[in-house]
Image: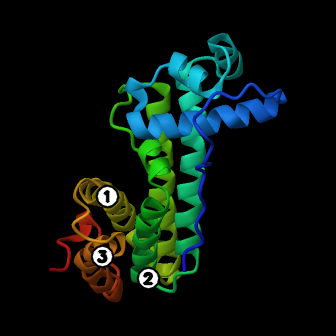
Amino acid sequence: MHEMVSPTPQPALVPQRTRLSRDERMEQTLGVAHLLFAEHGYASVTMDEIATAVGVTKPLLYNYFGNKEGLYTACMERAGDALTATVGHAVTVAASPGDALGAGVRAFFAFLDHDRAAWAVLFDETLPRGSGVADRIAEYRWRIAELVAGSMLAQLPKPRRDAARVEVEALSTALLGASEALARWWLRTEALSADAAAELLIATVEPGLRSRSALPASPSPEEGTRPR
């Protein structure tokens, strides 16, 4: 059972003129904006639409968040923190590198299945390249890959960790990319269950990892060719 962290609230998308404190209004705005961004994408949502849905003026939104990117970043950070916490909890209890890989992939797909709105905000393809929010999302990807890599390394005997570090970090980065690509395919087709998609990826990658972790420490490129 994965410890699931979900950042997505469920506010009603209707104007509410009830007098709220600043913190309460910001919380309400984040909930409404999160769902609008998840449904329509960053590029298609305007601050006017968010203000109307929340029931406040657009200048108030700018006062709270600075601009649309600032508001989106606040939504995205919740999603990123939740996904990172979910994957991090899963991999920290793994007993071997292969188990860490499997736990990370299963947690990733369980999170996606449990909270698609959070996924949509965190992996929005309409975000402008080179923007601050795109850079923040790249940081979350790096953190998740680091969590998986760190857990896998921790399961290896200490004398082998330095020699294995580059391979493990490369594999963790590749695994995250493969997980994202498979997740997009799954969301588009739903031809498999989320669990089945996770197991398909694990079954493809895990045997190679278990084989590598069972071998003596791999020689560095300077020392010769790798084991075949």
Disc 1 and disc 2: Cα gap in Å?
20 Å
Q: Residue at x 62, y 13 (%)?
A: 58
Disc marking residue 99: 2
Q: In the rendered view, tell whether residue 52 sits above or below residue 223.
A: above
Question: At which x and y percent is residue 119?
Answer: 44, 50
Question: Disc 1 vs disc 2: which is toward the camera?
Answer: 1
- Secondary element under disc 3, as helix, strand or loop, is helix
What residue is shown at x 39% (from left), y 34% (from top)? Answer: 40
| Element marked by disc 2 | helix
Q: Which residue is mark 1?
A: 183
Is 214 drawn above or below residue 117 in the view shown?
Answer: below
| Residue density around tag 2, few if under 14, some if 14–19, many if 20 or more, within 10 Å | many
Q: Position of residue 217 (x, y in %)?
A: 35, 80
Q: Amino acid at mark 1?
A: Ala
Quadrant location, the N terminus: bottom right
| Residue appearing at x 19%, y 71% in the figure | 224
Residue 104 is drawn in which quadrant? bottom left
Closest to the observer, 4 or 208: 4
Q: Give the x, y percent position of residue 218.
A: 30, 76
Asked which secondary structure carries label 1, the reply is helix
In depth, the one of 214 and 51 nearer the eye is: 51
Which amino acid lies under the numbered mark 2 shown in the image of this protein?
Answer: Asp
Measured along the vertical axis of the image, is residue 13 above or below residue 43? below
Q: Earlier in the sequence, mark 3 or mark 2?
A: 2
Q: Is residue 57 left or right of residue 83?
A: right
The residue beneath circle 3 is 196
Of the 4 image quadrants, the one containing the C terminus is bottom left
Residues marked 1 and 2 touching at CB (< 8 Å):
no
